[in-house]
Image: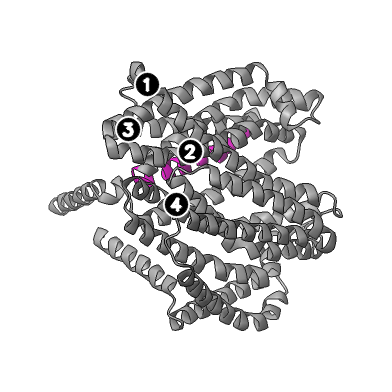
C-alpha cells in the first residue's frame, strides 16, 4: 500500500514537472494563442454577465449606479483606449528593436514604461484635484448629489485607470514574446475579483464594493504581470536614464497617437448610431443597443482572438523582412476569417428573430421588441465579414508601423456611416442604421484593399481570395437553402425550452451542411481549419 502511494506521488511529480517545463507555458503558436484567447474571452463574457447581474441585484438602476457608471467612463474608456494603443504599438516597435539588440530593446521598453508612469501620475494627480470638471465633460447633465457622487467615485477609480494603462503595455510586451496564456489568465482572474468583491462586501459597504472590485482588478493585473516581466523576462532592471534617445521616444509617441485616435474614432460608430436612433420612435435606442451586443458576440469571441494571436507574428515578420512567412500567415488568417464570418452572417440574417427571443424576450421585452431588435441584427450582420477583415487589415498596417493610414480610413468610414444613418433611418428606421453601418464597413473594406495593394502589404492576388470567397458564399447559400424551410419550425416553438432545443438542433444541422458543402467545393479555408484542429489534437495527445 505504502509502495503504491510512493509510486503515485512519483508519477504525479513527473507529470507536474513535465507540465511546468512544457513549451506551451513559455510561448504559444498562432493556433494555440487563438484557442486560448477564444476560451478565455468566452469565460470573461460569463464573468462580465455575472457582474452585471450582481450590480442589478444589489443596486438596480439607482442614482448611485448612474454616478458610478459615469465615474468609470474616463478610467475605463479613455484610459482603456490609451492602454489598447500602448498594447498595439509596443509589439512592432519592440520586434524591430529586438532585431538589433535584445538588451537595448529591453532598455528602450523600460524607458518608455518610466515615461508613461510619469505622464500618467501627472494626469492622475490633475484628475484627483479636479474630478468634478472631468465628470462634467462626460456627463454635463449631472448636478447636485449625482455630480458629487460621481466625483467621489472617480477619485478612487483613477487607481484602476492608472494600472490599466500600464497593464496594456505589459500585455503587448508579453504578446510580442509570443506569450498569450499568462496575460490572458491574469486578466481572467483579475476580472473575477469584481463579482467576488460584490458578493463579499455589497451588503456591508454598498456600491463601494464595486469600487474595491475594480481597483483590485487593476492592481492585481498590473502587479502580477510586472513581477512576471521583472523576474522571468528581466525587464525594468536597467533604465540608462542618461542615455535616453529622445528622438526614438518621440517616434514612439508619433506612432502611438494615431492608434489612440483610431480607437477613439472607432468608438464613435456606436455613439453615432445611438444618437441618430434617439430621433426615432420610443424603444429604438434600446433595440439598437441589444442588436449591437448580439452582432458583437462572434466578433469578440472568434475574430478578436485570432487577430490578436497573429498580430505579433505579423510584426516580427515585418521587422525581419520575411515576406514569404508573412504572405503565408496573412492568407491563412484571411481565409479562416471568411470561413467563420460568412456563414454566421447568413445565419444571423435569417435566424435573427429566434436568437433575439432566446437572449432577450423575457419580462418587459415583448415580441414587438424582438421584431425591432431582430431587424437591426439582420442588417448589422451584413457587415460582419467586412468589419472582421478591416480589424485584421488595421493590424497589418500597424505591424509595418503605418499608423496613419488606418486613422484616415476610419475617419472616412465613420463620416460615411453618419450620413448613411441619417438617410437610411428615415426610410427603414432602426434597420436602416444597421444597414448604414454594414455599408460603411464594406466601403472601408474596399478602401483597405486598395491601400494594402498600393503599399504592397496585400500578398494575395485578387483572383485567389475572390475564388475562395465564392466557394464559402456558395457553401453558405446551400446552408441557407436548407435552413429557410426550417425557420417556421423554430419560430413556432411554444415555450422557451422548446425554442432553445429546436434552435440548437437546426444550427448544428445547418453548420453540418455548410461544412459538407465546403468540402465538396474543395474550400481552402476548410483545409486550413482542419489542419489547425488536427495539429491541436496531436499536441493534446502528446501532452497527455
Q: Mark 3 vs mark 2: which is more N-terminal?
A: 3
In-image side of 367 versus 104 (left or right) = right
Please tell me whether mark 1 or mark 2 is closer to you in this view. 1
Q: Mark 4 vs mark 1: which is more N-terminal?
A: 4
Residue at position x 34%, y 26% from top?
236
Q: CA distance from mark 1 to mark 2?
A: 34 Å
Frontmost residue, 52 versus 300:
300
Frontmost residue, 167 versus 255:
255
Q: Disc number at residue 190?
A: 2
Frontmost residue, 21 versus 90:
90
Q: Where 359 sits versus 394, above or below?
A: below
Please tell me whether mark 4 or mark 3 is closer to you in this view. 3
Q: Mark 1 vs mark 2: which is more N-terminal?
A: 2
Please tell me whether mark 3 or mark 2 is closer to you in this view. 3
Q: Disc number at residue 178?
A: none
Q: Mark 3 vs mark 1: which is more N-terminal?
A: 3
Q: What is the quadrant of residue 71 in the picture?
A: top right
Q: Secondary structure at mark 2?
A: helix
Residue at position x 48%, y 48% from top?
397
Q: Secondary structure at mark 1?
A: loop
Q: CA distance from mark 3 to mark 2?
A: 29 Å
Q: CA distance from mark 4 to mark 1?
A: 35 Å
Q: Secondary structure at mark 3?
A: helix
Q: Quick one: quadrant of the N terminus? A: bottom left
Mark 3 sits on what residue? 105
Amino acid at each position: 500500500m505504502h509502495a503504491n502511494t510512493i509510486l503515485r506521488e512519483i508519477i504525479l511529480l513527473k507529470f507536474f514537472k513535465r507540465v511546468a517545463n512544457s513549451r506551451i507555458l513559455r510561448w504559444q503558436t498562432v493556433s494555440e494563442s487563438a484557442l486560448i484567447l477564444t476560451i478565455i474571452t468566452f469565460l470573461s463574457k460569463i464573468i462580465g454577465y455575472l457582474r452585471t447581474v450582481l450590480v442589478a441585484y444589489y443596486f438596480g438602476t439607482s442614482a448611485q449606479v448612474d454616478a458610478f457608471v459615469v465615474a468609470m467612463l474616463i478610467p475605463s474608456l479613455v484610459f482603456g483606449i490609451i492602454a489598447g494603443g500602448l498594447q498595439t504599438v509596443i509589439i512592432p516597435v519592440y520586434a524591430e528593436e529586438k532585431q538589433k539588440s535584445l538588451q537595448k530593446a529591453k532598455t528602450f521598453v523600460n524607458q518608455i514604461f518610466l515615461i508613461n508612469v510619469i505622464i500618467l501620475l501627472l494626469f492622475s494627480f490633475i484628475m484627483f484635484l479636479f474630478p468634478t470638471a472631468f465628470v462634467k465633460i462626460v456627463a454635463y447633465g449631472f448636478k447636485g448629489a449625482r455630480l458629487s457622487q460621481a466625483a467621489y467615485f472617480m477619485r478612487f477609480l483613477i487607481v484602476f485607470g492608472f494600472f490599466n494603462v500600464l497593464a496594456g503595455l505589459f500585455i503587448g510586451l508579453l504578446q510580442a514574446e509570443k506569450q498569450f496564456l499568462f496575460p490572458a489568465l491574469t486578466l481572467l482572474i483579475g476580472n473575477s475579483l469584481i463579482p467576488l468583491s460584490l458578493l463579499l462586501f455589497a451588503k456591508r459597504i454598498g456600491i463601494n464594493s464595486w469600487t474595491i472590485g475594480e481597483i483590485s482588478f487593476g492592481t492585481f493585473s498590473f502587479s502580477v504581470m510586472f513581477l512576471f516581466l521583472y523576474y522571468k523576462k528581466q525587464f525594468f532592471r536597467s533604465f540608462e536614464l542618461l542615455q535616453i534617445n529622445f528622438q526614438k521616444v518621440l517616434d514612439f509617441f508619433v506612432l502611438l497617437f494615431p492608434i489612440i485616435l483610431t480607437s477613439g474614432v472607432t468608438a464613435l460608430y456606436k455613439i453615432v448610431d445611438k444618437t441618430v436612433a434617439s430621433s426615432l420612435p420610443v424603444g429604438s435606442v434600446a433595440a439598437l443597443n441589444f442588436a449591437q451586443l448580439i452582432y458583437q458576440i462572434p466578433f469578440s469571441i472568434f475574430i478578436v482572438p485570432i487577430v490578436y494571436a497573429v498580430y505579433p507574428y505579423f510584426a516580427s515578420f515585418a521587422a525581419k523582412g520575411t515576406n514569404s512567412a508573412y504572405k503565408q500567415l496573412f492568407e491563412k488568417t484571411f481565409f479562416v476569417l471568411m470561413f467563420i464570418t460568412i456563414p454566421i452572417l447568413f445565419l444571423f440574417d435569417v435566424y435573427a428573430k429566434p436568437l433575439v427571443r432566446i437572449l432577450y424576450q423575457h419580462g418587459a421585452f415583448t415580441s414587438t421588441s424582438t421584431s425591432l431588435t431582430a431587424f437591426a441584427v439582420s442588417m448589422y450582420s451584413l457587415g460582419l465579414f467586412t468589419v472582421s477583415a478591416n480589424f485584421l487589415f488595421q493590424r497589418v498596417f500597424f505591424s509595418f508601423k503605418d499608423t496613419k493610414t488606418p486613422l484616415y480610413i476610419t475617419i472616412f468610414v465613420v463620416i460615411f456611416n453618419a450620413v448613411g444613418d441619417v438617410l437610411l433611418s428615415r426610410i427603414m428606421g432602426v434597420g436602416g442604421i444597421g444597414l448604414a453601418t454594414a455599408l460603411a464597413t464594406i466601403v472601408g473594406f474596399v478602401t483597405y484593399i486598395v491601400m494594402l495593394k498600393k503599399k504592397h502589404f496585400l500578398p494575395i492576388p485578387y483572383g485567389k481570395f475572390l475564388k475562395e470567397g465564392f466557394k464559402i458564399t456558395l457553401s453558405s447559400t446551400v446552408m441557407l437553402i436548407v435552413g429557410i424551410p426550417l425557420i417556421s419550425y423554430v419560430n413556432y416553438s411554444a415555450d422557451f425550452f422548446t425554442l432553445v432545443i429546436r434552435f440548437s438542433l437546426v444550427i448544428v444541422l445547418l453548420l453540418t451542411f455548410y461544412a459538407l458543402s465546403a468540402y465538396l467545393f474543395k474550400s481552402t479555408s476548410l483545409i486550413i481549419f482542419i489542419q489547425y484542429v488536427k495539429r491541436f489534437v496531436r499536441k493534446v495527445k502528446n501532452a497527455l
